[in-house]
Image (cartoon, coloured by chain):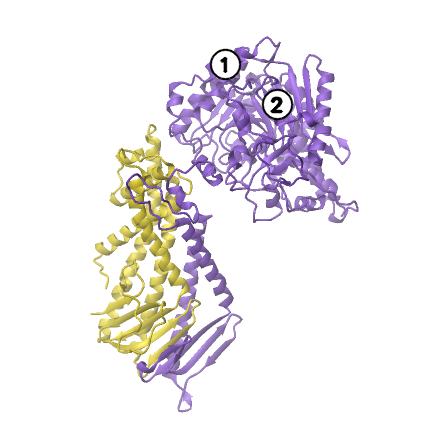
Amino acid sequence: MSNLVSKELFTNGIDAETGGPKDGGIHITTELIAKIARGQKITLEDWTDIKWRKNYDFKKTPDFGVGDGIDEKELSQTGWAVIFPASLPQKSVDTIKEALKPLLDLRKEQAAAVDETYYREVIGPELGYQNGETKNSFLKRFGRGPGPAVPQDGFPYYAMIVGSPETIPYTFQYQLDVQYGVGRIYFEKPEDYYRYATSVVAAETKKMSRSKKATFFGVANDGDRATAMSSSGLIQPLAQKMQEKYKDWAVDAVVGEKATKANLTNYMGGAQTPALMFTASHGMNFKMNDSRLFPHTGALLCQDWPGPKVRQPISDKLYFSADDIASDADVFGMMAFVFACYGGGIPKMDNFYKQLNIEQGSDIAPYAFMSQLPLKLLSHPRGGALGVFAHVERAWGSSIQWDGEIKDTVTFQSMIDALVSGKPAGAASEYFNERYAEISTMLTEQLQVPTENQDDIAIADYWTSNNDARNYTFIGDPAVRLAIGDGKVSAPKRASLGEFVSKVPKGVAGAAVGFQPDIVERTASAKATSGGTGPDFGLTDFLKPKEVLTVPAEGKSPMVGSGNLNDSLTKLVSKLGDYLSKALDDATSLEVSTFVADDMSHVVYEERKFTGAELRAVTRISLDGDTLVCVPQKDGEVDLAVWSIHLEMVKTAQANRAELMKTIVGAVSGVAGLVK
Amino acid sequence: MPVFESTVDDELGFWASVPTPKTVSFGVENVSAPVGELLYRVNLPADATDSEQVFNSNTAAMQRIEAALSEVPARLDGLVTRTHANLERQSDGLSFDVLAGSDENELEGELLLQLADVDMGASGKKAAGAVSYGIGETVSEAWGEAKNRFDALISQIDRDVLHFAWVETAQANELIARTSVDWSGDAQTVWQAGCSDVQLGLHQRNLRFVTQTRALRMRLFVTVASGAARVASLMATPGGAVLALPAVYQYVSKILAQARELQGIQSI
């Protein structure tokens, strides 16, 4: 154990209800994280990837991710793939493919220019992503193991995942992203796919661009060390570097008091919208039953928030969400980097709690989902943004400040440099993957030191930095690049794109009704869980506790208002659980009594005992093996007739109890899953 | 004629339902089963062989019910697989459009229709072909009826688990023995002095039969619960498994009824 004092760490998540940190009750200290890190099991697969990546990065510069000699700016060399879930219904597959057709055609033209195998559609029951696949098992199907992406050997470098994080998990994305350029899109409406696809195509083929302008938006809420750090340690240095390095770029640093929601609206679709937008702030987090969970998770908490010392619920007036993107917003061609907790999405289970082995309260969402703000930007009907780099789960401030002192912005700066130089987003994000690989190795090495010599603070820093670097994801096609031009494309001209991107083909528009975006319908679930929709008077209302439907069809009696099925199931499971608990407590003994009565009509049952009959034998069997037996006697001898009866009754009682408990255990396990 | 009576409404059909008596009869007027506790009583023929035959018959019936229940998971799995395959083939159909051309037999077909109704009702969409009615009628009536029956099953299980069972065996209206079994399995039995080994055996068989009935009811419940989970993938509605429970219960009940009919089994 280090003799250094433990220090508290800061994350960029704020709970809307309390106005306090996401981790309200828990002090996240280096000591705590170090414990988690020590308990963290790194799989062989993870370790192999990390070693590969680290060795590879060490050997070569300046390119990484792709194999030697491959230019990651050239899709004809890198290849490009699109990955769908294998079990997505065929109808949905067809609809999404049609909606994405402009983009798929473009990528095919680019990637298959030299070798047609460089363009891959990983779609369908056999080829698509199979449920539960890891990155390695996935790539194995294409003849690839760990190592750099070499498309001619099996799989292209750029891979666009089309699917929700519940169906194609974030963990798969993280793993694949270690060596490949990965992005993800997932929309609930087919027209949104079309809008995004046509926006990307317009940016690349119609020479529609934005002027060279970058904005760095850094919130620093009063009394909040996390945003103070991100503002001074990330946003301001990045803005300064950008100004110094790229003289032909207009750079705005919107920090401190200027970083208000109203001002952000100007930069996110308003008159000041840049080609490259970089924000650092807290990301909003909501409780499971909060109606804002689905629409506003990851929304950007602005300077309007008075800070953590004013513990008050946070309203949507203080944060910028997808709802704040105006219908006439000019976001086409923009690329954004969102440094905020949950800015990119949220897993179902809180990783931190999970690793802490705190099961209760570890679910933070009904299922993993992507934050709406980036998706709204990408699918805007007037022309969408090209992509958003954003963080899944918590964003940790310790990544900015390395080793307690160094303001480490090199990774961020390198990514910006890569984008400005024309590299596609998937390649630009490799700096985070390189950092992830390096820190993972450092973390592992630190954990290999005998425990008594381990440095808690170093472990905690490595662990948080490791997760931070890993959890940056790109939302969009990883092959997109900044659409920057000479500024001659006016805003009105860009606005005319609306007509183009929203001219949804009939086949796509026609499929909108009943469109199932995922392998199962989750949208309604999220909204139902969060209360996001109004009453539909449907059956889902039966699932709401203690409610009786009273709104019938006109002229009809109320729908089955006799109670709540889920509620009664829950109560039953609870009761069965109680039974088991009591039975286990009482299983320390089983008591069987045998009475004999000359005249049954005189037998009375009072206070759970028979009277009016002679108690002839009692057996009490304890769990520890002790057995109390009262043997019946007759004329000084054991009454064998009664004793025989009694023994039979003991056997019967034992069998009955065993059978009852067995069936109850079966019932509890059978039904518990239904009412979770 | 032997009489198997119980204060429990026995969905399985082995015990005839009787109101909870203040006094348990068989000529033992002053011995009362505790009010609210579950009474199971059987009055067997005077002839021991006939009495044994009664139990043999019921035990065989129970085994057939068990066999029918054990087939349910496979039948539902098959239904789910076939329906998914059909849905994939009919690429232009919505989730349950396939029903129109379904080749499923009557029971499975009915189940699919019920699930479709529930699904459409829950999602606020009208069922395929349901032009003149929506959730207000389709769901409130059919689903409501099924739900009430399922609620009754839950209630029975609730009582089965947490209450005493009061088990009486009589032969030709003469009480042989009475056993009180509490929820933890502790048992007190009072025997008529001088009862024979055969009578001893009859009461023990009765006790086993009561236990088996309770276990089978629990198994019915588990089968329905797991069946609902199986067919939930056919539903687009969140919480589909819970919503499917009444429909699956109805489906399973009909299978059990068929089993009884096919085997010529009658409740006694």
Q: Residue B8, located in which quarter of the rendered image?
A: bottom left
Element type where label 1 sits in the image: helix
Q: Colour of chain A?
A: purple
Extreme-top residue of the structure: A488
Proximity of marks 2 and 1: CB atoms separated by less than 8 Å: no
Q: Residues within 10 Å of mark 2 (few under 14, many from 20)?
A: many
Q: Colour of chain B?
A: yellow
Residue at 38 percent across and 25 percent down: it is A511
Quadrant in which residue B24 is drawn: bottom left
Locate residue B211 relative to residue A59 in the image: left or right. left
Label 2 is found on which chain of the structure? A
Q: Which residue reaches farthest front?
A: A555
Q: Chain of mark 1?
A: A
Provide residue A553's location: percent of width, then percent of height.
31, 39
Q: Are marks 2 and 1 on the same chain?
A: yes
> Residue A427, labelled with which disc?
2
Count of residue discs:
2
Sequence order check, earlier mark of 2 and 1: 2
**Tag of residue A497:** 1
Please tell me which residue lies in front, A247 or A260: A260
Q: Which x, y percent locates residue A303?
A: 66, 30
Q: Residues within 10 Å of mark 1 (few under 14, many from 20)?
A: many
Residue A155 appears in the figure: no
